[in-house]
Amino acid sequence: MTNEIAYIGLGSNLATPKTQINTAQQAINGLEGVLELAFSSLYRSTPMGPQDQPDYVNAVMAIETDLSAIELLRCLQKIELDHGRVRKDERWGARTLDLDILLYGQQMIDLPDLIVPHYGLAERAFVLYPLHEIAPELKVPGLGGMAELIASCPLDGLVKLPL
């Protein structure tokens, strides 16, 4: 199998979110068959769903991997569990850690457990702006280039956090 470049969205709004993001980055780096290529700045965003929860901290990580998309998904789900993630029926609720495969090479994947490109990528500032920061020339399969995507996605309260 050939290596693919994948982009992972990281988010947290519980249990010291910056620490959750940083330790998740380390855990992803520790996966066999994964090499980190880039990591965005951290960004603060308001929650998408219920507003009675803390703001999120988000980032995007670029990796090179020989794992299949599903193998990568399973590894990321284990990291979420290791960070205290509890999966509930409620969408967009508070969570210690959320790891999403945003892109996996130029593949378009539509499986029960995995949709790539990530279904909300084009509308979510907390995904697009960190992704643009580390891959400004990226072409998103079925959606176009980063410049066009950013141009049609307002910041929506997104704030880049100081180092």
Image (cartoon, helix red, strand yellow):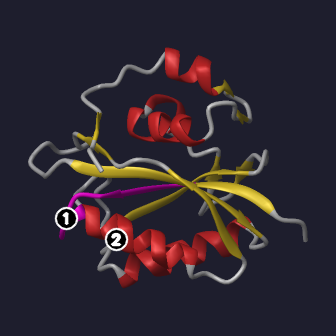
Is residue 80 visible in the rendered structure shown here? yes
Residue holding disc 2: 87
Q: Residues within 10 Å of mark 2 (few under 14, many from 20)?
A: few
Residue 36 at what x, y percent from top left?
A: 62, 65
Q: Nearer the viewer, mark 2 or mark 1?
A: 1
Residue, x 39% and y 80% (percent of image)? Answer: 81
Q: Residues within 10 Å of mark 1 (few under 14, many from 20)?
A: many
Is residue 95 visible in the rendered structure shown here? no
| Mark 2 to mark 1 CA distance (whole Å) | 14 Å
Disc 1 element: loop
Q: Magenta span has 55? A: no
Instruction: Tell me which numbered mark, 2 or 1, is placed earlier along the sequence.
Output: 1
Which segment did they paint magenta? 8-17
How many numbered callouts? 2
37 sits to left or right of 91: right
137 sits to left or right of 9: right
Residue 143 at what x, y percent from top left?
A: 67, 27
Residue 146 at what x, y percent from top left?
A: 61, 27
Residue, x 68% and y 58% (percent of image)? Answer: 111
Mark carried by residue 14:
1
Residue, x 40% and y 47% (percent of image)? Answer: 41
